[in-house]
Amino acid sequence: MKELACAAAQDLLPLYIDGLLSPESQALVKEHLESCESCRKAYERMCADWAEQAEKEREEGRDFARSLKRARRKLSRRALRNLLIGLFAGAAVCLLVLWQQGVFAKRAQSTAPDGSITAAVYGADVTGLFPQGGAVTLITTGEFNSWAIYGNAVFEGMWWSPDSKRLLVQMEFDGEQYLELISFEHGNSRNLAFYLDALTAEAEYLDGVRLKENGRPDIAYDFVQWSANGRAMLFFYTGYDETGAEVMGYFWYDLNGRAYGCVRMENEAAEGKILMAGVRPDGSRFYTMENGLDENGNVREAVFTVGEGTAFVGCEEVKEGDVVRVTFWGVEDPNIPVLSVALVEEAQEDR
């Protein structure tokens, strides 16, 4: 095998280190390095320089990778920040739109029994660009689209008639009770409290009731329920007489402007057959019963509500057809029940 000169061997060292020589040339250079100390030292220096350069390049690569990672991290933080800003901005816009539409001011929503009309009540004037407090807005949609604003009003409740033709909305309006009776059948409305005051001012069962400065009776009315045909409403009334004593009772009011079935429950008793049982809007149970005859010979009705102050005497419950004696004690002693119900005669199954 021929030998290499030192100059030729050193020229081939870069290719030798990278393993790019032919097998024969690779063997010649290897053999020469084993026998030539000068070329072997040159080879070792070249290997050390290359290793140092490779490490430097690897370090530069690691630095670049770290820089790239930091850049990506910055981009991620910036993207996350922009995303959060976008989300908050979007949520703020949505909340503003909902506020403009009065969603947060909505107090109640109710649909007529036949599904034809939906009434929504808001505790603010929501007809402008932004809701304005201190008012009540009533909006109806469906077969009858309308809106009405009641300034300085507070919403208390609303109830549909069973035939879906009327809606009663109870409010406090300018410090006075306001019962807005809306007739979708005739397309009009009226303050029913005014008509009730006119009736109760002349009612014998409310003789001696204290009057307010405007001359109207000092009476508050609470809606109980509609009649089955939607032509009458049952009201519970409370007020005060001239001595300051509280008076209370029930009466039916029909759409012809008449009050009937009136009873003033003031330290008195009623005895008769239970005609009907029902549930008030607040969830309490009530019963209507016969209560003698009026001056025209018609059956009078009395109404009593079962609550915490009701005591059942000789029974745990009563039902339609039972004959009962109901006594209203009208006292504030917590040890004495406000109302006692005694079973006089139990209803027969065939009754």
Image: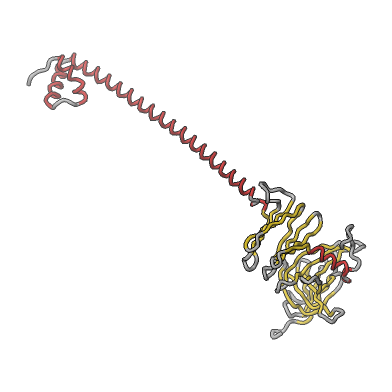
**Is residue 279 visible to the viewer in this orientation of the structure?**
yes
| Position of residue 204 in the picture relative to residue 342 (left or right) | right
| Position of residue 247 in the picture relative to residue 281 (left or right) | right
Number of disc labels? 0
Residue at 70% in and 74% down:
229
Residue at 51% in and 40% down:
83
Check the image and report above or below for 325 versus 3. below
Rendered location of residue 322, percent (x, y): 75, 80
Residue 110 placement: quadrant: bottom right
Rendered location of residue 70, percent (x, y): 44, 31
Rendered location of residue 42, percent (x, y): 21, 16
Residue at 69% in and 84% down:
349
Check the image and report above or below for 279 versus 17. below
| Position of residue 282 in the picture relative to residue 42 (left or right) | right
Residue 172 placement: quadrant: bottom right
- Of the pair 8 and 335, the residue shown nearer to us: 8
Q: Which residue in the rendered view is the most extreme toward the left?
A: 1
Residue at 11% in and 25% down:
24
Residue 37 placement: quadrant: top left
Rendered location of residue 248, percent (x, y): 83, 67
Q: How has the structure been colored for display?
A: secondary structure
> The C terminus appears in which quarter of the rendering?
bottom right
> The N terminus appears in which quarter of the rendering?
top left
| Position of residue 297 in the picture relative to residue 131 (left or right) | right
- Of the pair 226 and 341, the residue shown nearer to us: 226
**Is residue 283 visible to the viewer in this orientation of the structure?**
no
Check the image and report above or below for 291 versus 1. below
